[in-house]
Image (tube, rainbow, N blue to C red):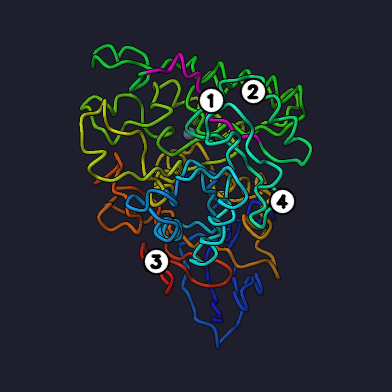
């Protein structure tokens, strides 16, 4: 196994609180040393001067489309995209075909991720059978399978039945697993194409009100308090939800939340040209909602930046907005949007950005060895990025099979230079490395 000496970079490691220049030696799959100056003549030297060396990122929310829609993305292509984006672990959402609602499917996804070997693929399990919201899935079996599922969600569908939500939480609390919700009241949101508001009226499109999200977020927080279950709110999109989470945390409830790069970057104005690539669920909201999400990320109300990477085939996205499926492929633009929209304008420090991208999601998921600390003996899951380097978003060059993004052509600040997973270099300057990529 190769040895690497990453020299002269600025180590930003929230788990240890370290922020300063240091050399990092990677050997035998682990961090072999972090010190002001390390001599290792036999190691491959990576000049990181001007760059940041940090724990590789952890994405709590990605759609890998395998099994079922391998034309849109595979576990291999998503793993390669994640490596290029600076990730060492990604959490695979269960809305596949078949649905990941049993031990056999989650184990298959987890094993396929291991076979590719570019990132750790963490399987999420469905809460209800076939995501139908009627009967609980085999939660205990999935938790005890080799995939060791920790996060359960019907993502894509909010759990409409409050009694089922309560029962799921009571059950999950028993083994300290996470109930994760796509907060959306289906009746309020039905037929909606974008955020309900002035712009939707002007564009003549049916809207999804902020209340569709907030009603379910409030219900879930109440049920989490009742049951003692850990609750994680997926892709928070409204100012009201941010405030609900802030209050719940102040009261000591076991609630965490994530936000996507597109929700902290864009507003519903992105739909003015009826761009199907800006159609996403939950929808892009108003400037005030976007500002509340940025503030929530800054003060820690929102714990994690998660991509909600949602690859779609070009022929599906390339149709009238009303018929196009919602979603943005985000693994290869997350760092650039984080630096450009949050760090460069001064909303978050680099330390806070790395915390939201890496250490906090790793600790929520209980992923030992990911998210730092970068200490001797820890698995070498490391990213090196240039916080000042610019990159033009060019989906044609992505490792992801998908091309659906509203950011094509945009120049972003923040460039991933090297990603290491378990001591192996998995991506270099936007290109994946490793034999398993074409698997
Ligand atoms: Zn969702």
Query: In the rendered view of the protein, which quadrant contains the N terminus?
Result: bottom right
Q: Relative to residue 408, is residue 268 depicted above or below? A: above
- Using residue 67 as the reference point, say whether residue 350 is left or right of it: right
Q: Within 10 angstroms of label 4, few (less than 14), some, or many (20 or more) residues?
A: few
Q: Relative to residue 328, is residue 81 depicted above or below? A: below
Q: CA distance from mark 2 to mark 4?
A: 25 Å
Tell me where the magenta segment starts and ends, as one range: 179-190
Q: Quadrant of residue 257?
A: top right
Q: Quadrant of residue 262?
A: top left
Q: CA distance from mark 2 to mark 1?
A: 9 Å
**Residue at disc 1, CB closer than 8 Å to ligand 1:** no
| Image mark for residue 183 | 1
Residue 189 included in the magenta stretch of the image: yes
* Mark 4 lies on residue: 144
Q: Within 10 angstroms of label 3, few (less than 14), some, or many (20 or more) residues?
A: many
Residue 381: percent from the left, percent from the top? 58, 63
- Using residue 326 as the reference point, say whether residue 109 is left or right of it: right
* Residue found at the far bottom of this picture: 42
Write the residue at 44% across / 54% down.
Answer: 387
Question: Which secondary structure, mark 4?
Answer: helix
First along the sequence among labels 2 and 1: 1
Write the residue at 56% across / 15% down.
Answer: 215
Residue 6: percent from the left, percent from the top? 53, 72
Question: Which secondary structure, mark 2?
Answer: helix
């Amino acid at each position: 196994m190769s040895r690497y000496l990453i020299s002269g970079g600025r180590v930003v490691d929230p788990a240890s609180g370290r922020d300063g220049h240091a050399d990092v030696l990677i050997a035998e799959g682990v961090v072999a040393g972090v010190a002001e100056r390390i001599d290792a003549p036999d190691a491959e030297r990576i000049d990181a001067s001007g760059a940041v060396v940090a724990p590789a990122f952890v994405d709590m929310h990605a759609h890998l489309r395998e099994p079922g829609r391998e034309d849109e993305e595979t576990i291999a292509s998503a793993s390669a995209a994640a490596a290029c984006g600076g990730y060492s672990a990604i959490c695979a959402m269960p809305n596949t075909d078949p649905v990941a609602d049993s031990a056999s499917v989650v184990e298959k996804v987890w094993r396929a991720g291991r076979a590719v070997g570019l990132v750790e693929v963490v399987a999420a399990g469905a809460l209800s059978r076939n995501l139908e919201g009627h009967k609980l899935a085999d939660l205990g079996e999935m938790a005890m399978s080799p995939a060791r599922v920790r996060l359960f969600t019907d993502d894509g569908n909010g759990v409409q039945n409050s009694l089922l939500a309560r029962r799921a939480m009571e059950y999950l609390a028993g083994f300290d697993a996470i109930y994760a919700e796509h907060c959306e009241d289906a009746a309020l949101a039905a037929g909606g194409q974008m955020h309900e508001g002035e712009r939707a009226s002007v564009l003549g499109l049916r809207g999804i009100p902020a209340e569709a999200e907030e009603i379910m977020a409030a219900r879930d927080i109440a049920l989490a308090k009742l049951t003692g279950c850990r609750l994680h709110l997926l892709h928070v999109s409204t100012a009201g939800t941010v405030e609900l989470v802030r209050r719940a945390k102040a009261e000591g409830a076991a609630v965490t939340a994530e936000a996507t790069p597109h929700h902290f970057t864009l507003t519903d104005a992105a739909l003015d040209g009826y761009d199907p690539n800006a159609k996403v669920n939950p929808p892009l909201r108003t400037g005030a909602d976007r500002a509340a999400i940025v503030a929530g990320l800054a003060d820690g109300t929102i714990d994690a930046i998660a991509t909600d990477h949602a690859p779609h085939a070009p022929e599906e996205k390339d149709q009238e907005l009303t018929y196009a499926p919602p979603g943005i492929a985000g693994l290869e633009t997350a760092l650039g949007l984080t630096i450009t929209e949050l760090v460069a304008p001064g909303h978050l420090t680099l330390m806070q950005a790395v915390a939201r991208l890496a250490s906090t999601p790793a600790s929520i998921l209980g992923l030992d060895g990911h998210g730092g600390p970068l200490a001797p003996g820890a698995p070498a899951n490391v990213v090196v990025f240039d916080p000042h380097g610019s990159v033009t978003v060019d989906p044609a060059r992505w490792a992801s099979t998908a091309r659906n993004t509203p950011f094509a052509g945009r120049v972003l600040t923040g460039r991933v230079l090297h990603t290491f997973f378990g001591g192996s270099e998995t991506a270099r300057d936007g290109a994946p490395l490793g034999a398993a990529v074409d698997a």
